[in-house]
């Protein structure tokens, strides 16, 4: 009983910290919905859209990494246990002088 009351008095009380917001600055900010895709109005007829400075870098990086991943997956080494077991069985059978291919005998 004495231990629990001592711990309660040592623990910082909650009302002392109520009302303070540590690590926050202002009310949350957000962009008001405008109804346009990505918040951009379409350009006037006859004008082209001006790209931002980061868009080409993003496109090259995104699709370049996809191509790099596809090439890497295509040339990935075969680490399947069944492939290893088949090669090991073929090697052992050839070492014993047995055929590892099935060749049906002609019974006629």
Image: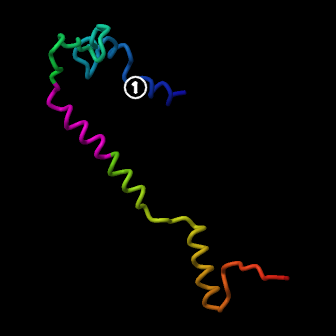
Which sits in the foreground, 7 or 70? 70
Q: Is residue 34 above or below residue 53?
A: above
Most distant residue in the right direction: 108
Residue plotted at (40% across, 25% down): 11
Which sits in the foreground, 71 or 46? 46
- The percent coordinates of residue 76 (x first, y second) are 43, 61
- The percent coordinates of residue 56 (x first, y second) are 19, 35
On whether residue 64 falls in the magenta region, the answer is yes
Q: Quadrant of residue 93?
A: bottom right
Structural crowding at the residue carrying mark 1, measured as other residues with C-alpha within 10 Å and reported as few (<14), some (14–19) or many (≥20):
few
Residue plotted at (38% across, 17% down): 14
On whether residue 76 falls in the magenta region, the answer is no
Which residue is the site of mark 1? 11
Residue plotted at (49% across, 65% down): 78
Q: Is residue 61 above or below residue 88?
A: above
Q: Quadrant of residue 96?
A: bottom right
Task: Label 1: state its secondary structure.
Answer: loop
Counting the numbered discs, the total is: 1
Which sits in the foreground, 102 or 18? 102
Residue plotted at (25% across, 42% down): 61
- The percent coordinates of residue 50 (x first, y second) are 15, 22
Instruction: Give the quarter of the figure containing the N terminus.
Output: top right
Q: Which residues are magenta?
A: 51-65
Main SS, magenta region, reads: helix
Q: Quadrant of residue 29?
A: top left
- The percent coordinates of residue 47 (x first, y second) are 15, 16
Q: What colouring method underlies this structural image?
A: rainbow
Instruction: Give the quarter of the figure containing the C terminus.
Output: bottom right
């Amino acid at each position: 009983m004495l231990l629990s009351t001592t711990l309660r008095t040592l623990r910082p009380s909650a009302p002392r910290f109520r009302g303070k917001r540590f690590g926050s600055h202002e009310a949350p900010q957000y962009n008001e919905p405008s109804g346009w895709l990505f918040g951009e109005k379409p350009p006037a007829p006859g004008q082209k859209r001006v790209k931002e400075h980061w868009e080409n870098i993003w496109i090259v990086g995104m699709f370049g990494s996809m191509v790099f991943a596809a090439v890497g997956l295509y040339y990935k080494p075969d680490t399947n246990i069944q492939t290893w077991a088949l090669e090991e069985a073929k090697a052992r059978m050839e070492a014993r002088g047995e055929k590892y291919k099935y060749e049906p005998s002609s019974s006629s």
